[in-house]
């Protein structure tokens, strides 16, 4: 994270100050960026205000003087409704000064990202999608990875802001390609966490200790992020959510959402991706039950419970 303020920082409106957006906005403020924020949740507004964000009473007020409008919302429908207006409210595209850039950091369908970017361009603005990887810890530490879909000129314009909030910024192509990269990455992550969890449960059944399993696999061909950073059993990686009763982290419900986005892309493209589709089924069941409030690595407990009656 680059925290050196400059004299030319753009005025930023930040909409969506939740677990991810709040810390991202705070990191901008700490780097000297003037940020005006809004969220529908009062507690999120208070937390942002306590950390230096100028909070206001409406999204329209937030964007009134903005040069960059950052959104971090749960779904594509939320993004589109915010841009165009819903329930009689003025949309952001109508309330924002000419010449601004719309930067959406939500994780949404590729087609939705392309649609809202086109809406912004049709209204005379520039636009980019820049979903993130790294979870709440990365948002707080300013170490997120940004996957950016934007024309070259827009990417160069927003890169300094992304550098403040993250440790890695990758230009993936034009509009929607940031979402494409995020969806593909998280399909790998979901599949690999299921595989790592199944392997640990199998190791338990065979009498192999967790630490011994970790010591071998973390230095062998099975090594992956799901093992070495987000290890689903307590002990080998002290900072993993498994050591904190599977508090997220990256929640099971979010993994379910991202895998469903991957399934949509799979169906649209006709790709044969049985592992991705199966991982989506597994995480949909997980998030409908105990996994709704757990880190996605908590899937190991479901696997362990399902295996309990088998020999």
Image (cartoon, grey):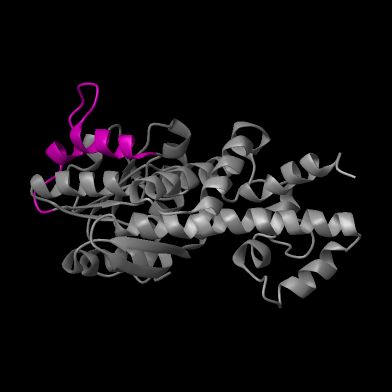
Judge whether 34 appears above or below 295 on screen. Answer: below
The quadrant of the rendering that contains the N terminus is bottom left
The front one of 274 and 169 is 274
Does residue 97 belong to the magenta stretch? yes
User: Where residue 105 sits: x, y (%)?
Assistant: 35, 52
Which residue corresponds to the image point at 24% horizontal and 56% vertical from the top-left? 175
Does residue 82 belong to the magenta stretch? yes
Judge whether 277 appears above or below 214 on screen. Answer: above
User: Where residue 112 sits: x, y (%)?
Assistant: 28, 43
Q: Quadrant of residue 311?
A: top right
Farthest residue, direction bottom: 219
Which residue corresponds to the image point at 27% horizontal and 32% vertical from the top-left? 58
Is residue 232 shown to the viewer in this render? no
Which residue corresponds to the image point at 17% horizontal and 30% vertical from the top-left? 90
Magenta region, residue range: 75-99
Q: With 135 as the anchor, is 27 left or right in this view?
A: left
Q: With 61 as the anchor, is 21 left or right in this view?
A: right
């Amino acid at each position: 994270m680059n925290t050196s303020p400059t004299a030319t920082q753009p005025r930023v409106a930040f909409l969506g100050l939740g677990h991810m957006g709040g810390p991202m906005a705070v990191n901008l403020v700490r780097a000297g960026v003037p940020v005006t924020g809004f969220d529908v949740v009062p507690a999120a507004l208070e937390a942002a205000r306590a950390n230096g964000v100028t909070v206001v009473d409406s999204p329209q007020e937030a964007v009134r003087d903005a040069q960059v409008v950052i959104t971090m919302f749960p779904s594509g429908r939320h993004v589109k409704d915010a841009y165009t207006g819903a329930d009689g409210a003025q949309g952001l595209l109508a309330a924002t000064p000419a010449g601004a850039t719309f930067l959406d950091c939500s994780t949404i369908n590729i087609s939705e990202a392309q649609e809202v970017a086109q809406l912004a361009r049709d209204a005379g603005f520039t636009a980019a999608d820049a979903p993130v990887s790294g979870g709440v810890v990365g948002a707080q530490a300013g170490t997120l990875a940004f996957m950016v879909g934007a024309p070259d000129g827009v990417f160069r314009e927003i890169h300094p802001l992304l550098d403040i909030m993250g440790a890695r910024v990758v230009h993936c192509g034009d509009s929607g390609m940031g979402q494409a990269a995020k969806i593909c990455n998280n399909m790998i992550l979901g599949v690999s966490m299921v595989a790592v969890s199944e392997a640990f449960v199998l190791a338990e059944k065979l009498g192999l200790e967790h630490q011994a399993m970790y010591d071998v696999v973390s230095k062998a061909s099975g090594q992956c992020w799901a093992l070495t950073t987000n290890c689903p059993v307590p002990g080998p990686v002290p900072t993993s959510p498994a050591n904190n009763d599977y508090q997220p982290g990256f929640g099971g419900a979010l993994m379910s959402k991202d895998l469903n986005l991957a399934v949509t892309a799979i169906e649209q493209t006709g790709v044969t991706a049985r592992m991705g589709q199966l991982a989506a089924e597994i995480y949909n069941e997980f998030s409908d039950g105990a996994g709704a409030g757990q880190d996605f690595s908590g899937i190991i407990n479901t696997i362990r419970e399902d295996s309990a009656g088998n020999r």
